[in-house]
Image (cartoon, rainbow, N blue to C red):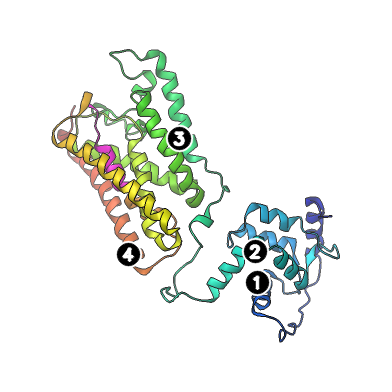
């Protein structure tokens, strides 16, 4: 029977008390290539070089994120039934585990092979984390977009009793949306994302930011995706205030478009690490969607068609921010030399835009409505 987790932990404590004993290399003359490869992996796991792998050593490797082993696989390893019940694995036990559980260690073997055999297009300084799809993980959980969406729903619900035909927002929204006549209330440059004009406006943003946002969080983690989302929101309000200083802003569209273009950026930067067909389809879909919708917003701006004084240029500036900040913040699974320069260019452009916008707001008050 497999040892339960309590027994495993006790076994790990005993392992810490053992004296490290260096062992001689086994005779590999009659081994095939697969067994030699597995032995190299075994040696890498055997941190104290005592000829055994403790469960604690396996847990350390799994939790470090260096290898993409599924949670099911990790549980199988933690609950392993070693032959002599000493809570550690000799090489033969480890080899039997790999041999009779090929799916469990397939990613480990493949990644270790890729580390040993350098790609002809890879520089010595490149960092390789693994294939894009294999980097998805629910630890840490994707909480950012769910949290933002819940706040937006709650605020919309709180204002419903106060919304009338002539009044499109309630008392809570009035304290949050971007008002060009209240620029001194700096929080409005960010909090307008929580306000939505109508149910269709709210649901349209929620669907995209939850589905796409969670997928991005699974690969890039919640804090990176949050930075991209918030960068798009702030760039949307900043850009709108500079190009259309007399319009109001409400909605999370700047952040939503930042997620979309950030996803396009990750497809470009991780092209060779993603499934080819899936990456092409996603790239075409999101690119066409952005061009069509953003083109419509630009035409509205050119033709001065700001309905009810609400600005739509936040879409365009949010999309630009997502592309720039996405390149700088989101994970790039295989760093190429040209991408490093691209990273600096992208971050410089975004930072320069924000700093310039702040300076204009402070030094040119007559440009804005009073």
Q: Is residue 158 visible?
A: yes
Residues drawn in magenta: 309-322
Residue 321 belongs to the span the image colors magenta: yes
Using the rendered image of the protein, determine whether residue 195 is visible from the camera's viewpoint.
Answer: no
Which circle's residue, 3 or 2, is located before the other in the chain? 2
Q: Which residue is depicted at the point 81% across and 65% down? A: 17
> Which secondary structure lies at badge 3?
helix
- Majority secondary structure in the magenta region: helix
Question: Horizontal and vertical percent for residue 112?
Answer: 58, 70
Q: Which residue is mark 4?
A: 341
Residue identified by numbered label 3: 148
Residue appearing at x 36%, y 18% in the figure: 170
Mark 4 secondary-structure assignment: helix
Q: Quadrant of residue 360?
A: top left
Pointer 2 and pointer 1: residues touching (CB < 8 Å)?
A: yes
Residue where numbered disc 2 is placed: 105
């Amino acid at each position: 029977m497999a040892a339960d987790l309590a027994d495993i932990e006790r076994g790990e404590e005993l392992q810490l008390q053992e004296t490290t004993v260096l062992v001689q290399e086994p005779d590999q003359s009659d081994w095939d290539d697969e067994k030699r490869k597995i032995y190299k992996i075994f040696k890498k796991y055997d941190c104290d070089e005592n000829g055994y792998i403790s469960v604690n050593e396996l847990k350390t490797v799994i939790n470090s994120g260096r290898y993409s082993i599924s949670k099911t696989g990790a549980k199988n390893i933690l609950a392993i039934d070693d032959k002599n019940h000493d809570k550690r694995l000799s090489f033969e036990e480890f080899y039997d585990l790999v041999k009779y559980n090929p799916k469990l260690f397939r990613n480990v073997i493949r990644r270790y092979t890729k580390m040993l055999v350098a790609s002809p297009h890879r520089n010595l300084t490149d960092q390789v984390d693994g294939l894009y799809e294999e980097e998805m993980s629910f630890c840490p959980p994707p909480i950012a977009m769910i949290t933002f969406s819940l706040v937006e729903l709650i605020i919309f619900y709180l204002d419903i009793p106060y919304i009338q035909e002539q009044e499109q927002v309630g008392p809570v929204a009035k304290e949050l949306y971007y008002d060009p006549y209240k620029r001194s209330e700096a929080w409005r440059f960010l909090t307008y994302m929580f306000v939505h004009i109508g149910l269709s406006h709210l649901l349209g943003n929620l669907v995209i930011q939850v589905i796409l946002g969670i997928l991005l969080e699974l690969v890039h983690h919640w804090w990176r995706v949050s930075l991209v989302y918030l960068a798009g929101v702030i760039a949307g309000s900043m850009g709108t205030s500079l190009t259309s200083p007399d319009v109001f802003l409400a909605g999370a569209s700047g952040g939503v478009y930042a997620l979309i273009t950030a996803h396009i950026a990750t497809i470009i930067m991780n092209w060779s690490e993603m499934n080819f067909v899936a990456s092409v389809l996603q790239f075409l879909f999101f690119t066409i969607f952005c061009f069509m919708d953003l083109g419509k917003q630009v035409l509205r701006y050119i033709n001065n068609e700001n309905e009810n004084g609400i600005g739509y240029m936040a879409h365009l500036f949010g999309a630009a921010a997502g592309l720039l900040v996405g390149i700088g913040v989101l994970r790039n699974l295989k760093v190429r030399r040209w991408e490093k320069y691209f990273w600096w260019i992208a971050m410089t452009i975004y930072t320069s835009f924000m700093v310039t916008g702040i300076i204009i707001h402070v030094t040119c008050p007559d440009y804005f409505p009073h």
